[in-house]
Amino acid sequence: MARGKANQTTDRRSQKEVVVPVSTWRYRVVGLVFGTIFVTFAVRAVHLQVIDNDYLQSEGDARYLRVQKEEPTRGMILDRNNQPLAISTPVDSIWMHPTTILRQQNEYSYEKLTSLLGISRNELLARAEKAKAKEFSYLKRQISPQLANQILALDVPGINSVREYKRYYPAGPVLGHVLGFTNIDNEGQEGLELSFNESLKGQPGRTHVLHDRVGHVVEYVEQLSQVQHGEDIKLSIDARIQYLAYRHLQAAVKKHNAASASLVALDAKTGEILAMVSMPDFNPNDRAELKSTRFRNRSITDSFEPGSTVKPFTVAMALEEGVIEPQSIIDAEQGFFYIGRSRINDTKALGEITVSDVIKRSSNIGAAKIAMKLPARDLYDTYRALGFGQTNQLKLPGEQRGILAKRKKWRPIEHATMSYGYGLSVNTLQLARSYIALANDGVILPVTLSPLEEPPEGERVFSKGVVDQVALMLEAAVSDSGTAPQARVDQYRVGGKTGTAHKVLNGRYQDDAYMSLFAGFAPISDPEVVLVVAIDDPRGVDYYGGLVAAPVFSAVMAGALRFRDVPPDALESEQKEPAKLMIARPTASMSRASQLQSGGAG
C-alpha cells in the first residue's frame, strides 16, 4: 500500500515537470512575430539607407522637385534706322498654390489680396477649388512689377509670382498691320509676329528646383538648359515715312468718307518696302481693339482692278515693239468707241491726240486702240513679267495673287479693256512693284521687307530708252493740263498716273462705287521712291484718282524724298501752283452697257 502511494506521488511530479502552461506559448508566438517584423524593417531600412539610399531621395524629390522655366525675351523688331517697332517689357504674373489657399480660407480673409487682384474673395476660392488638382494656377497675368511687389509684400502663403514679358508696340496703330501682335503667352498671331514667331520667341531655360509645400523655391538643384533669347529682326521700313503715310492716308479716308485705303512706298533702286499702310487700322497695344475684321493688311490682301494706272505699260509695250512713237496720232473719237456691241468711253471727246496725250489725258479709247495693234498674248506676257497674277512671296499672312486670266483666245473687248486696267486685278503692293520697272530703267526688282546692302538682281521688262519716253509722259500727267496736278511735289520732278476704276460687286460693275488710285515715282531725273495710293469707295463729289489719291501721294512723296536726303531736281522757275482739276462726271443718261465698258477717267 505504502509503496503504491509512493509511485503515484512520483508520477504526479513527473507530469508537473512536463506540462507547459498555455499562456507561455502565446508570449513566445507574439514575440516571434514582432521579432520577425522588426528584423524585416531593420533589413529594409538598411537596404534603403545603405544599399539603395537613392530611393527615399527620389520619392521626396517626386513630391517637391519641379522643372522651373525661365522665359526668354522676345526679339525686337526694328526699322531700317534701328528705331524699335516692337519690344518686350518685363512684367510679373501672380499665381497660387490652390490647396494652400483652400486649406487656410478660415484663417485669412484675403481682403487686401483680392483688392489688389481686382477680384472678390468668392471668386478667388472658386478658382482655387476648380484648380485644386493642380499645383500651379495663374491669378493675374502680366502686371507691373510694382503691383506684383505689393501683392507679394502681403506674404500670403500659397501666393507667388513669375517673371514674364509683355509685347509693346511704340508706334501703336501706325504699323499694326505689318507687325501684327502676340497673345498673352507671347506667341505671334498676325503679321510679322506670326511669320517670324519661331526666331523671335527664343527658347525657355529649364532648371530643376525644390519647392516647399506651398510652392516657394527653396533650392536650385540643376540647370537643365540655358535660356535662348529671341533674335532681333530688322526691317526695310522707314518709321518716319510710315508715320507720314499713315497720317495722310487716315486724313484722306476721313475727308472722303472712304470704306478703306492702302499705301505702299518702295525704294526704286532696291525694291525695299519703305512704308506699308492700311485703313481701317487697329492698335496692337489695346487688346480690346483686336477684332479680326480690322487685321487685314489691305496692301496685300485686297485686290482691285487697277484702271488707268496700267496704261503706261500698254504704251511702253507698243513703243518697245515699234508700232507707235510718242508723237504718233491716235483718234480718240468723240468720247466713245465700239468694239462689236461693246462700247468704250472717255469722259469727253478728245478727237485726234498723240500717244503722249493718251497718258496725259488718260484716254481709254486711245489705250485700247494702241493695244489692238499688238497681240493680246503680248499684253498678257507683259503683265505677267510685271508680277501681276502672282504673289511677291513676302513672309506676311494673307497675301493674294490677284487675277490675270490666261486664255487660249482673247475676245476683242477683253483685249481692249485689259489695256486700261479692266479684266484683271492687283493689290497695292503688286501695282507698286510694277512701277519699279518704269522707275528703274526698265528692270523690275523683287520686293522685300529686309534691308539690303546691294540691289538685287532684277529682270528687264522694257528698254531704258522706252521707259525714259514713258517717264516724260507721266511727268506731263501731273502738269496743269494733265489729270493729276495735285500730285506735284515742290522742287522735284514727279511722274505718275491716276486711276478711277468702277468697283465690282456680285459680278457687276457699280455705277457709284470706285477705286481712286495714283501710282508714280520721283524724282524723274533719278527715281528714288515709288509710291502707290489706293482709296476704296470715296463718297462725295470728289472720287477721281487725281482729286482723292494724288494729294496723298504728293504729301507723302515730299516727306519721303526729304527724309532720304534726295536733292531737288526741278528749277524754281519750273514750279507752278497746282491748278484745280475739273473733270466732267459721267452723265446720268449714260447707258449701263457704256458704264460697264468705260474705264476710269484717271
Image (cartoon, grey):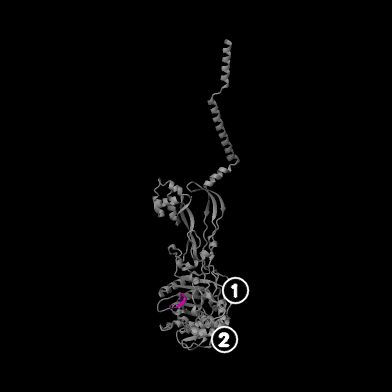
Compared to 111, does 506 lie above or below? below
Q: Camera-side residue: 526 or 396?
A: 396
Amino acid tagged 2? Val
> What segment carries the magenta color?
504-511
Residue 364 visible to an observer of this rendering: yes
What mark, if any, has residue 274 been given in the picture? Answer: none
Q: Which residue is mark 2?
A: 323
Amino acid tagged 1? Glu
Q: Regarding mark 1 in the picture, which secondary structure is present there?
A: loop
Name the front one of labels 1 and 2: 2
Q: Camera-side residue: 47 or 460?
A: 47
Q: Which residue is mark 1?
A: 457
- Is the residue marked by circle 2 packed among few (<14), some (14-19), or many (20+) residues within 10 Å? few
Q: Quadrant of residue 549?
A: bottom left
Kindly give the residue lying farthest to the top in the view shown. Answer: 2
Give the total of numbered labels. 2
Is residue 395 one of those drawn in magenta? no
Q: Position of residue 512 (x, y in %)?
A: 42, 78
Q: Position of residue 1 (x, y in %)?
A: 57, 10
- Is the residue marked by circle 1 packed among few (<14), some (14-19), or many (20+) residues within 10 Å? few
Magenta: predominant secondary structure element?
strand
C-alpha separation, residue under disc 1 versus residue under disc 2 = 30 Å
Q: Position of residue 344 (x, y in %)?
A: 48, 84
Q: Camera-side residue: 469 or 8?
A: 8
Choose the circle earlier in sequence order: 1 or 2.
2
Q: Position of residue 568 (x, y in %)?
A: 50, 78
Q: Regarding mark 2 in the picture, which secondary structure is present there?
A: loop
